[in-house]
């Protein structure tokens, strides 16, 4: 049976590019993209991508050349997800919040051959290219392509001369009958996404065609996304290629509603105008929506499915957002997992449970996606699976073809991440008796106090339940007796004419709601928590401050207060 | 980027066996299987499969050994879909309607090492083994394993002695901690399904783990099957492994409602008792349901999703079945395509159309599945795609990893089927302007009359719309002037005290409803159309009869009438 050879007809490579060709054949006249006054059908999107791919070929793009782009969620950004790999290239979407130095570092490391840049980000891109030229010894210097936006800014012919070419001109010049470069090997790279390392320099995560294909299908299955969805792009496409839904919407013959700015007003307006059915985001976007001004709000006529990731949606947020017409599915993934590795798949029987219990269950990260081979929570000392008791902590490890190929030019980090036959997420979790996984912390954020593991997330979740707390972060600080102990940083909600809260009040509240050893030994009030460009709290910075606080606690607190006031 | 090597963690083989392990972890206490008085959870099903796999290993099953089974849709049949490949074997489900000689031919050709047989089929299996022994020179002789069924027939200890072993005993003897044989290569075979060739000897279609995995996911996506479905097994699992839904239900953490007999009463009873959400079948099963006696009927409380394949569901059937609580999705596939290659995916905009137009659209075979690389309708002379005009006919060709690996021990047929980079379905179709494909005929059933292609299916569909017609088949008969012309075989509905219809009446009816050249030149009335064991009309037999009718038309019609009366 094994001597049957492979034929061209049954051994084609798995690649999400096929979704576009299929959409063009099966959903030819359906709307593929809506962006303010711009609308395309799937046939048009396919043709535009063929044209752009052929223009990239005319500009001598070679197989596996990196094409970088700095742009918000506009149609060009969407099209490049197909056009770049159709030309044989690898798409590198750069976080628009990065500074010029970060961008230069990425351009240098990736050896990008092209840099597409949206008009708003031109000054930053030019600065980055200058840095690349002056401070690096780049192996290649990218051609700069301008992306104009007639919906927001009229074309300026004088600007274009400063660029190698302009996006729409590349489309117009391109050949609509271009034959895309055939993907011979599904392990070939399709995308390169730099992680926003909080402590180390960013790592270039390489996705394969196979991984992107499987993850796109997997994420559709996880969400139960039916045919012809209308997806509002509240999730940046530069985050893991919009968790692979860039390709997934084409697979489903859906409509992409593009967004330049993620304001509450823009969200309500687009949902209402285009009958949005789906959106992905971090829970913080749901907070924006709830905080919308009355004038910005529109009634949500039919339920909007939300896939939320980044952090578990707090109970009150869930109740409030669902009461106005959104339905939230909580999932968990990393750049390295190409979208959701876990999702809190809803068990129909849970509908009978009290709302509070439902919210608790919804905060779980859930079960492994269908295209992963396996997910486990392991004691990393013994590599044994932890007990399904909802208590014993271990690290989440993953295995499967949806995972990244590896870190670009970083064999050491790649081998470390994939050691012992598993991908190590660095996230510490428990497994509940029903098999659902719940994250307790990042492994480096765990506080080890007197031999006990304290989940900083668990302490934070108690702090977040306090009516006066806006933001909270808990980190380890050195303790002479216990080794480490928890230190809380808290930002309070601004309530006018009310007295400030004291450290003692917070500690007393924690004593009522937490085991004694988990109660913060110190509480510091701040205006706002320090965050990375992707919105992650910079705990390493807070740890430094906590350490300083302890060291200075016998002496004057001046330096410390200076440090705190910087936040 | 290509120098990143594969790691164990990101290069695991795609295999549907993983769905069971995942189901056992994530849906441990959900009901996996219901069969009359028998119920299992996913944890139990997983354990039973591990035990059976370990028992097969104890019986010295080797990698890629064929395990044949003759059984209806009972739990053992379901479990073998996982347990056999977990032991490294290849599952060969045999059509229970085949006769002993067919079964012996399959056992000989596949070199089966085991034959599992349900108690009802023991006499036929024994006869097959006798034939295998006496008339073949088998390279191996299978061990016979009895599958008893306490729900229908009490255990009989005396019977067991005639067998090598008994199914439940193998389960009991097995090791629940067995470690399944690792699938190193996703191109390894998982199943072997013999086609019911109408003209040639049956061909052994080999499925790979990769193809089964992709097709299972693809079929879930095509159907939009959500989590925790309750699937009633009205489709024999021996038909393309139940179109891969054997594996698919595990992927979705659903419940398999097993059925020994597919009677209307059993169907209504199970739907009602177990809140069935999904079922697959040929349209004829829907006719059974509609013809149920009053005493057999139960109200359908919530809509049952039906995936129908085999032939397009006629309009009146659609209206009637949907009016009592079923919703039909029409799809198309072959054994070689591992389930649905095309499906008539519903466009939400069609809901606004008149019911008749909706039924016409629903009769289309539709668009290609998501895991196929491509589907096309080609002029086989030029290999050009046909126009999307709903008129120009060509052959449906497929490409993608969901397709079979090939035909066992038949390189010639395999190469022919996969020639020119495509799998050739042998089905003739048109492409409508909306991209939806509609089958017009099997290529060998097309009637070529005066240079015009006549679709026998098109003529039949007109005949079927006649209120008195129960069954109709149209084939080519030799014609001195036109080369071929259509000959119709018609079975009439039994209506008491009504006069028989005449040939002229049928022809006159066709003249009103068809272009002249498509009108049958001869109509013969029969009691019933001749069919294969899988219910396909044996057109080659009808063609022989038509030919004889023409030859004898100048002389006496005696021989012909004899031939017709045999039907």
Image (spheres, coloured by chain):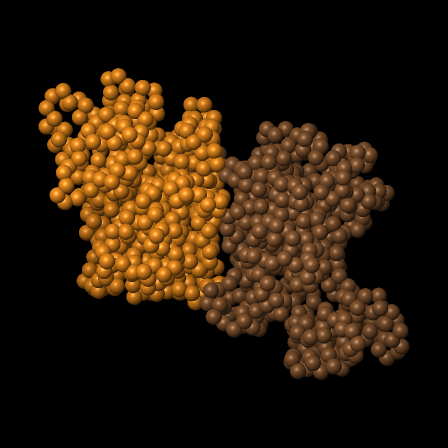
Chain colours: A brown, B orange
Residue A229 lies, in percent from the top left, at: 54, 49
The answer to whether one can see residue B115 in this image is no
Look at 27% across and 22% down and name the residue there: B484
Residue A30 lies, in percent from the top left, at: 54, 41
Left or right of B52 in this view: A486: right
Using the image, determine if residue B208 lies above or below residue B169.
above
Could you say which is closer to the camera, residue B63 or residue B1?
Answer: B1
Using the image, determine if residue A546 lies above or below residue A36.
below
Give the quadrant of residue A45.
Answer: top right
Q: Quadrant of the C terminus of chain A?
A: bottom right
Using the image, determine if residue A461 lies above or below residue B213.
below
Residue B477 lies, in percent from the top left, at: 24, 25
Look at 46% across and 28% down and name the residue there: B386
Look at 32% across and 44% down and name the residue there: B316
Left or right of B514 in this view: B354: right
Could you say which is closer to the camera, residue A33 or residue A453?
Answer: A33
Left or right of B186 in this view: B516: left
Could you say which is closer to the camera, residue A309 or residue A304?
Answer: A304
Look at 39% across and 56% down and name the residue there: B303
Using the image, determine if residue B188 lies above or below residue B56.
above
Give the quadrant of residue A341.
Answer: bottom right
Could you say which is closer to the camera, residue B350 or residue B169?
Answer: B350
The answer to whether one can see residue B18 in this image is yes
Residue B524 lies, in percent from the top left, at: 19, 31
């Amino acid at each position: 049976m094994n001597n049957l050879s492979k034929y061209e007809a049954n051994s084609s490579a798995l690649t999400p590019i096929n979704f576009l060709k299929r959409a063009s054949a099966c959903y030819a006249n359906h709307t593929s993209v809506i962006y303010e006054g711009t609308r395309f059908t799937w046939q048009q999107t396919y043709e535009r991508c063929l044209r752009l791919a052929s223009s990239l070929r005319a500009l001598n793009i070679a197989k596996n050349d990196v094409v970088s782009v700095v742009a918000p969620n506009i149609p060009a950004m969407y099209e490049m997800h197909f056009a770049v790999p159709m030309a044989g290239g690898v798409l590198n979407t750069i976080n628009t919040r990065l500074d010029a130095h970060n961008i230069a570092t990425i351009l240098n490391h990736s050896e990008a051959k092209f840099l597409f840049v949206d008009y708003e980000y031109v000054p930053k891109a030019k600065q980055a290219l200058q840095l690349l030229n002056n401070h690096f010894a780049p192996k290649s210097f990218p051609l700069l392509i301008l992306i104009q936006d007639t919906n927001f800014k009229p074309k300026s012919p004088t600007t274009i001369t400063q660029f190698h070419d302009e996006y729409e001109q590349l489309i117009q010049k391109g050949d609509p009958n271009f034959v895309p470069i055939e993907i011979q090997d599904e392990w070939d790279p399709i995308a390169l996404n730099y992680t926003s390392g909080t402590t180390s320099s960013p790592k270039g995560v390489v996705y394969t065609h196979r991984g992107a294909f499987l993850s796109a299908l997997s994420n559709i299955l996880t969400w139960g996304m039916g045919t012809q969805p209308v997806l509002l792009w509240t999730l940046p496409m530069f985050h893991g290629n919009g968790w692979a839904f860039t390709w997934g919407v084409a697979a489903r013959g859906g409509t992409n509603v593009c967004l330049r700015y993620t304001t509450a007003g823009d969200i309500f307006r687009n949902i209402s105008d285009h009958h949005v059915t789906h959106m992905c985001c971090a829970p913080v976007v749901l907070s924006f929506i709830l905080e919308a001004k009355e004038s910005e709000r529109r009634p949500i006529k039919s339920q909007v499915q939300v896939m939320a990731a980044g952090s578990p949606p707090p109970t009150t947020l869930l109740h409030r957002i669902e009461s106005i017409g959104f339905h939230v599915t909580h999932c968990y993934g990393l750049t390295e997992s190409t979208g959701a590795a876990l999702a809190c798949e809803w068990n129909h029987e849970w509908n009978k449970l009290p709302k509070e219990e439902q919210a608790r269950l919804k905060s779980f990260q859930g079960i492994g996606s269908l295209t992963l081979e396996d997910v486990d929570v392991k004691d990393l000392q013994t590599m044994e699976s932890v007990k399904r008791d909802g208590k014993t902590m271990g690290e989440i490890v993953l295995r499967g073809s949806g995972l990244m190929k590896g870190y670009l030019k970083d064999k050491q980090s790649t081998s470390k991440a994939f050691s012992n036959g598993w991908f190590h997420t660095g996230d510490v979790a428990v497994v509940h008796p029903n098999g659902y996984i719940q994250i307790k912390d990042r492994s480096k954020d765990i506080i080890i106090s007197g031999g006990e593991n304290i989940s900083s997330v668990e302490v934070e979740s108690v702090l977040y339940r306090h009516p006066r707390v806006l933001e909270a972060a808990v980190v380890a600080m050195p303790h002479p007796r216990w080794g480490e102990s928890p230190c809380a940083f808290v930002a309070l909600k601004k309530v006018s004419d009310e007295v400030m809260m004291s450290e003692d009040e917070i500690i007393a509240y924690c004593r009522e709601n937490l085991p004694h050893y988990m109660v913060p030994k110190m509480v510091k009030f701040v205006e706002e928590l320090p965050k990375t460009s992707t919105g992650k709290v910079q705990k390493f910075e807070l740890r430094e401050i906590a350490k300083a606080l302890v060291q200075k606690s016998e002496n004057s607190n001046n330096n410390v207060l200076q440090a705190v006031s910087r936040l």
